Structures are given as C-alpha cells and as structure tokens.
Amino acid sequence: MITPNFFILYVDNPTASVAFYQALLGHPPLEASPTFAMFKLESGVMLGLWSRHTVKPGAGTLGTEGEIAFCVSDKALVDATHTDWVNKGLPVVQTPQHLDFGYTFVALDPDGHRLRVFVPE
C-alpha cells in the first residue's frame, strides 16, 4: 500500500499564498516559482501550492472540498492558536468548540481552504 506524503492546494495567487503559509508555518518554502511552491512540514509531509490558472488538468472551484488539519497536544494550544490566527487576520468560520471527535476551530486561507486545529478528546 502506498502512503500519501504530499498534498497540493490549488490557489489563485501563488505569491500571496506563499506569504500566507510562510507566516502561518514559520518558515519559507523549499522551492517557489511564479506558479508553484512547496513547503516541508514538521511531520515530513509536503504541502504544495499550485496556481489554479496553470494546473493541468484544470481545477474547479477553490477551497470548497476538504481541509488541512493540525492535530495539537491540548485544548490550551487550540485556544492559543485561535487567538494567534485571529490576531493575524485569518477569517474564522468556526470558533473553538467541542464536537464529537474533540475540541476544534476552523479558519480559512486566502483561497477559502479550511484550516482546522483540533485536539482529540
């Protein structure tokens, strides 16, 4: 069985998305061009940002399917991340709350991709 180790988001403006994710993740991409950038996450998983205008085959609507999830160690870190992201101006579409799987909130990146932070309970 193969294991996914690289995820790609289609973005409207790669330069703006690189700036957003660089600030969010705290480090620059491994590589960047006008149409694509790649970040290595602490887990070793790669995150690609590809211009929706140049991806082949073409992509549909941005940010409507799926999300990037950040599993953290405790509820305090969920709350601290929420506060940090609100202070950075990220739109929050779900404030911190308890759901059936744990404590969580959801913010959006510049293309409307969901960014979920949670701790399992």
Image (cartoon, grey):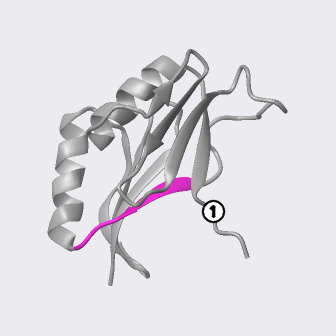
Residue identifier under label 1: 4
Residue at position x 53%, y 22% from top? 14
Residue 104, x across and y down, in percent: 34, 66
Q: Label 1: how many residues lie within 10 Å, few (<14), some (14-19) or many (20+)?
A: few
Residue at position x 25%, y 42% from top? 85
Residue 18, x across and y down, in percent: 43, 27
Residue 77 shows in the view: yes
Magenta segment range?
A: 67-73
Magenta segment, principal secondary structure?
Answer: strand
| Residue placed most toward the observer, 69 or 32 | 32
Q: Is residue 107 magenta?
A: no
Residue 89, x across and y down, in percent: 27, 32
Which residue ends up furthest to the top in the rendered image? Answer: 34
Could you tell me which quadrant the N terminus lies in? bottom right
Question: Is 63 displayed left or right of 115 in the figure?
Answer: right
Q: Quadrant of residue 76?
A: bottom left
Question: Is 58 displayed left or right of 26 in the figure?
Answer: right
Query: Is 33 placed above or below 6 here?
Result: above
Q: Quadrant of residue 34?
A: top right
Residue at position x 61%, y 20% from top? 35
Residue type at mark 1 is Pro
